Image (cartoon, rainbow, N blue to C red):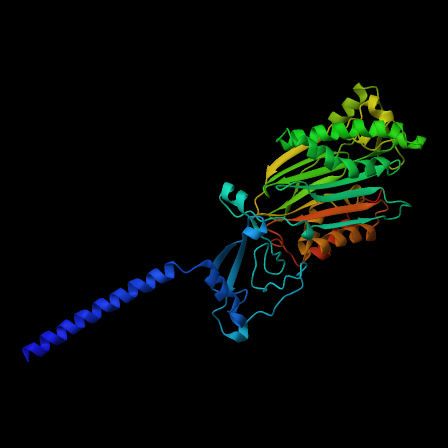
Amino acid sequence: MRLDLMLLLHIVTHVGEVIRASIVLAVCAVKVMSAACLARLARCSGPYAGRNGLFHSALVQHSLQQDSHLRFTVFRRQLNSPSEQRHSNTRFDADSSGRPTTWDSFGIWDNRIDEPILLPPSIRYGKPIPKVSLSKVGCTSLIGQRKENEDRFQVSQMNDNILYFAVFDGHGGPEAADFCEKYMEKFIKDLLVEESNLELVISKAFLEVDKALMKHLHFSPSVPAINAGTTATVALLRDGVELVVGSVGDSRAMLCRKGKALKLTVDHTPERKDEKERIKRSGGFITWNSLGQPNVNGRLAMTRSIGDFDLKNMGVIAEPETKRLSLHHAHDAFLALTTDGINFIVNSQEICNVINQCHDPKEAAQRISDQALQYGSEDNSTIIVVPFGAWGKSKNSDTNFSFSRSVVSSGRWA
């Protein structure tokens, strides 16, 4: 009897050690489970994936074949019954990637934009920095009631880590805007070889483009072209974080942060005291037209521009005002560049509100241009919408009504 008890005790002890060893091995196996296995599990979750899930796991995939970009996706698994699952929303699949609707890495669920993460900047700044793909940027330019569209815009990947966005609103003919569209990026790119300060680069590029345009127009067979000019608003985005904007004239740049419009430019008009004083010191004068708008020497509505060489001795300069800031993708939804065909009708916060209603940047650009035309804009209207990490966060179902009401009552019809 005693031998049987001792044998039983020995067996129980041995079984306990085996169980403990099995648990240790299981824990080790879980710890070494690769991200690829987790990703496969996410893809196979089928109908249990949805918006209201309680289990969130970040899946990070790195592919050397994708220019060292880190693909960061979030899998949301619904633990409720299948009857509560969200219907698939496939309205925004611009790249036809066929990626499951549960992979939400850029913006919010209804306005998601699937983008990779920039690996080097993310490591440098210690947080995920989404890559802004040019294919997701929205751009629209309408002729309005004019005979010719003198607006120009450009969006490009300047180099591996800098994106270039620009709008030019020409006057006195399209020659100046055409020249800036063709050469501004080149001048900036050449200056970047020796200068890393983006504010200095933009300032020098504007002045050099202005000088080059003067030489170009002097050899132009069209005599009136010597009086052509243009606004210029340029934005450079480096490493997905550093945003630098430079401008002359009245084309604007605006950042939507936490649903509020943050103005990045200030119009260069004779209404500004500092601008008016410079014009007067240089021998120029200010007159007002029949609409009560001030003009330099009775001709130009702005105090800074590229071109307008007949007014250069009167204080009209091509030196831009610049602004630099760091993006916070958790709060910053988009950057918008606009010409005065839009700005004359819609203020910055109205633009912000309307764009926040839109599903993607291309729809947003088209809607803003259409609204400006609908509510009385007679000028050319151009807009660029660049989405950032908080795209869609500030969506408000009441915006459509408040926009139309505020435009009608704004009094900007003079």
Q: Is residue 50 left or right of residue 139?
A: left
Residue extending farthest to the bottom is 1
Residue extending farthest to the front is 65
Tell me residue 351's x, y (percent): 71, 48
**Which sits in the foreground, 118 or 358?**
118
Residue under the point 84% across and 49% down = 376
Q: Is residue 121 left or right of residue 201?
A: left
**Which sits in the foreground, 142 or 70?**
70
Residue under the point 66% across and 29% down = 200
Q: Quadrant of residue 188?
A: top right
How many dots with numbers? 0
Tell me residue 261's x, y (percent): 66, 44
**Which sits in the foreground, 56 or 135?**
135
Q: Is residue 386 left or right of residue 77?
A: right
Check the picture and name the quadrant holding the C terminus. Answer: top right
* Residue 298 visible in rendering: no
Q: Quadrant of residue 210?
A: top right
Check the picture and name the quadrant holding the N terminus. Answer: bottom left
Q: Quadrant of residue 228?
A: top right
Tell me residue 294's x, y (percent): 83, 31
* Residue 175 visible in rendering: yes
Tell me residue 62's x, y (percent): 52, 53
**Which sits in the foreground, 354 or 320?**
320
* 337 shown above or below 202: below
